[in-house]
Amino acid sequence: MRICGLLLASVLIGNVSMAATPVLVIHGGAGVIRKDLTPEKEKLVRADLETALDAGYSVLKSGGSSLDAVSKAIVVLEDSPRFNAGKGAVFTHEGKNEMDSAIMDGPTLRAGAIAGVHRVKNPVLLARAVMEKSPHVMLSGDGAEEFAKTVGIELVDTSYFRTDERWQQLQEALKAESSKHASTPGRAIHYGTVGAVALDAQGRLAAATSTGGMTNKRWGRVGDSPIIGAGTYANAHCAVSATGWGEFYIRATAAHDICARVEYAKTPVAEAARTVVMDVVPKLGGDGGVIALDAEGNFATPFNTDGMYRGWIDREGKMHVALLKE
């Protein structure tokens, strides 16, 4: 009777004892503008996504944790100038770079997040440090960077994040803002958030997201990426990382909604993700996409924009990368 009770307790708290086949899924942001995707840029983006997949999957293949896998994959994308995270972060209205990130461990529901940092080379590593080395879930701004110093997270000069492409995007956004014919705020803004979800050989799920936010954002705006349940969420059943117009993902608690549908309604992960991305978020006025993965290694990458940089290594160990609609 005691053994049965212990087994039941293990199930109830979400511990996973059965072996699983590792799976890794990543994204480099939704809202891809087709006309701006030159053959040269496409080649570079694909190479970065493949490098990120290799980095994360090498962890999983060697028996490492899903947390380590998503961290490794995102660091690669943060170090590339081609994604709106880390090195490639976009500029705020004031001409600064403000970055957000979050990470979550599915089996334990531990989470860490940071918002509005300016000098953190790899925001996802600081988010993980918040989770593992502090009693908190989210830190922001100068306080987050002070914490970074205490735990050995690398800080860099703000000039590290400046790229000509992102600066030009800001100038174009400022010009559009001053025009009487400016488009709806948000829809004309480049989305480039990066994210990863992983299932490791021990059956553990994890999710992480990192972003520079929206070009021309003001007043310390924070989007969905660092908000647990909005842009990032993982439990024992499902892991999600979102990309898109963050205000609407926050209002819909989109990442948690997908996982709740999987856990409580037993909805297949592809159906749950598609419903939220193609129905719930658009009805509020937003757009974007997600990557979602369940505990059996099933995954989905729905988006309602022109494209979404994405890639995965499936249960057969096969790599695939896609940028636009297929």
Image (cartoon, rainbow, N blue to C red):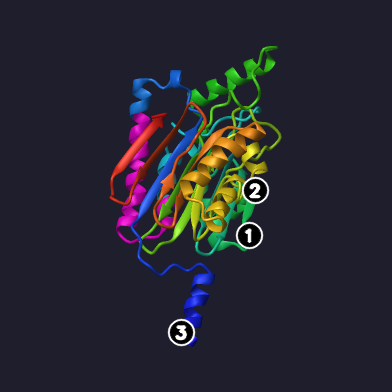
For disc 2, the marked residue is: 140
Hey, which quadrant is residue 51 in on the image?
top left
Is residue 185 placed above or below 12 in the rendered structure? above
Residues marked 3 and 2 touching at CB (< 8 Å): no
Image check: 140 left or right of 13? right
Q: Residue 271's spot in the image, x, y percent?
A: 49, 45
Point out the frontmost of discs 1 and 3. 3
Q: Could you tell me which residue is drawn at 44 percent across and 18 percent down?
A: 35
Mark 2 Cα shell of 10 Å, populated few (<14), some (14-19), many (≥20): some
Nearest to the observer: residue 129 or residue 155: 129
The residue nearer to you, when weighing 246 against 293, is: 293
**Percent coordinates x, y for residue 106 in the rendering:** 50, 59
In the image, what residue type sits under mark 1?
A: His
Main SS of residues in magenta: helix
Asked which secondary structure carries label 1, the reply is: loop
Specify start and end residues of the magenta stretch as a single range: 44-71
Q: Quadrant of the C terminus?
A: top left
Q: Is residue 122 visible?
A: no
Q: Residues within 10 Å of mark 1 (few under 14, many from 20)?
A: few
Q: Which residue is mark 3?
A: 3
Pinpoint residue 107: horizontal percent, then vertical percent.
50, 63
- Name the residue carrying label 1: 136
Mark 3 element type? helix
Of the two numbered discs 3 and 2 in the rendering, the one whose residue sits closer to the viewer: 3
Q: Is residue 49 magenta?
A: yes
Q: Earlier in the sequence, mark 3 or mark 2?
A: 3
Which residue appears at 58% of the width and 26% of the height?
A: 189
Q: Which mark is residue 260?
A: none
Q: Is residue 16 above or below residue 90?
A: below
Left or right: 266 with respect to 43?
Answer: right
**Residue flagged by tag 2: what amino acid is it?**
Ser
Towards the viewer: 171 or 13 = 13
